[in-house]
Structures are given as C-alpha cells and as structure tokens.
Image (spheres, rainbow, N blue to C red):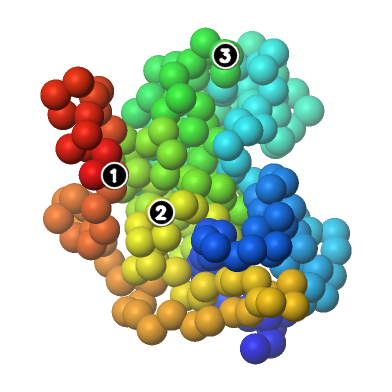
C-alpha cells in the first residue's frame, strides 16, 4: 500500500487496533497513544514536520484560558482581545461546517476555564478546535469519551463534513472499535516484528449521507452511562 500517496490524495479514517493479548508488543501501548500515531507515520516514511491536531485523554487545553480562548488562540495574534466573541463567531462561520453549530450545545460554558467546565464541554471544545484547524492529520484518542449519545452523533456528522471539504486524514484509537468499524477505511495493527500492517475494511462509502435523525441511521450502539445501584450494578457490568 502506498500510504504517502493515499494521505496526499484521499480523506480517510484509520482505526488503530486496541491492544489485546499482544504480549511484549503491548508494552508499546503504555505511553501516550499519540506516540503510536507518530511512529506509524515515521514507519511509512511520511515526511516531517507533520501538521496535526490531537484530541486526547489529556485535554491539551491551556488551563489559564477559557474554552473559547483556547479555540481562538491558534488563529491570530489579537485573538484574546475584548472582541473574542465576535472573532469566535466569525471563525466558525468561515469554516461553514453546519454541524459545528450542534457541537456548540455546551458552549454556554465557553467562558469557563477547563477546570471549571464539564467534561463534555471540554471534549466539545477540543473537537471544535481540531476541526477548524489547518491540519493534514487529526489524531483522536477515545473521541467518544465524555460525549452524550446525541453530542457524539453531531461530532460524527461534523467529522464527515470536514473530510468531504478538506484534505485531511483521521486516525482513531479507541477501546470501542465496534463504534468505528462502519466509519473507517483501514485498520492499523502491530505485527510480531513490531512493524505496522494496514488492512482494508470492506464497507459502504464513508460519505454516505446521514439523516438528521442520526440515532436511527447510525448502526453502532453507544455505551450509555448510568449511575449504578447495589441492585443492578452486577447486571450493568455484564
């Protein structure tokens, strides 16, 4: 597979295999998952520097700034002025991704700092920051984490729109690969020689239209969270 050609000419989703019973290879997964993504690009001799944005379990947001300021800071030197509300709306309008509006559900927390905001608001800010960046690659570590089912559906629609209108490739590492099996084009896994192997996924087009009622059209089942009680905790764990 000519990976460099594909990365330069296609917009696709790659899903990293989550480590299961890999023996000594499993040690490679002990560090930040973004390191595995960088190792993968280097293995296939993709020329550096890489323009990429990462969504990871470590929020990668500056804690001294609000969520809105974290999003704005990548775009202009005067982003953190009193006009930030106007600049924020202007930047979102420029990217013309209609699904970003849905992702703004929790941006009533936009003026809060990461340590003050909800986990879902933080993840939403990370997603918006990544999707409006000028990146060749987006690496997403467990992107579904902390999102409600509805918010995740908006995120998925926003990602599809982004891939349709930009030259970008998305790399996902998730402990719930079944959620992404329908959406990705390739699986990435380590082999016994510590190298990488890419397997094509037979599937329908990634750009198949998704109706507004995403809960009906999406084929995966999002693992919903709920408070456990003594009476049902064992059933839920099963």
Pointer 3: residues within 10 angstroms few (<14), some, or many (20+)?
A: few
Q: Position of residue 82 (x, y in %)?
A: 64, 11
For marks 2 and 3 on the same chain, the one whose residue lies earlier in the sequence: 3
Q: Is residue 131 in view?
A: yes
Look at 28% across and 33% down and name the residue there: 225
Q: Position of residue 58 (x, y in %)?
A: 63, 33
Q: Is residue 135 in view?
A: no
Q: Are marks 2 and 1 in contact (CB under 8 Å)?
A: yes
Above or below residue 146? Residue 179 is below
* Circle on res. 115: 3
Assign a secondary structure to mark 3: loop
Picture quarter with the C terminus: top left
* Circle on res. 223: 1
Tell me the distance, in whole angstroms, between the alpha carbons under discs 1 and 3: 26 Å
* Circle on res. 176: 2
Q: Position of residue 27 (x, y in %)?
A: 71, 55
Q: Are marks 1 and 3 in contact (CB under 8 Å)?
A: no
Look at 59% across and 79% down and name the residue there: 198
């Amino acid at each position: 597979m000519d990976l460099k050609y594909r990365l330069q000419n296609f917009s696709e989703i790659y899903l990293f295999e989550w480590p299961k019973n890999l023996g000594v290879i499993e040690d490679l997964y002990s560090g930040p998952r973004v390191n595995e993504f960088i190792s993968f690009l280097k293995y296939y001799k993709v020329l550096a520097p890489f323009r990429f944005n990462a969504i990871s379990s470590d929020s990668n947001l500056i804690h001294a700034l609000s969520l809105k300021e974290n999003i704005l800071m990548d775009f202009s030197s005067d982003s953190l002025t009193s006009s930030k509300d106007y600049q924020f709306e202007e930047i979102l309008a420029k990217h013309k991704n209609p699904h970003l509006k849905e992702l703004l559900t929790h941006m009533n927390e936009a003026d809060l700092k990461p340590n003050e905001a909800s986990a879902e608001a933080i993840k939403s800010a990370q997603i918006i920051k990544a999707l409006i960046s000028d990146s060749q690659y987006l690496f997403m570590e467990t992107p579904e984490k902390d999102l409600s089912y509805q918010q995740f559906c908006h995120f998925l629609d926003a990602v599809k729109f982004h891939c349709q209108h930009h030259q970008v490739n998305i790399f996902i590492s998730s402990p719930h690969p079944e959620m992404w099996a329908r959406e990705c084009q390739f699986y990435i896994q380590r082999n016994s020689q510590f190298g990488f192997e890419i397997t094509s996924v037979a599937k329908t087009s990634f750009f198949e239209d998704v109706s507004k009622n995403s809960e009906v059209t999406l084929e995966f089942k999002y693992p919903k969270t709920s408070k456990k009680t003594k009476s049902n905790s064992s059933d839920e764990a099963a």
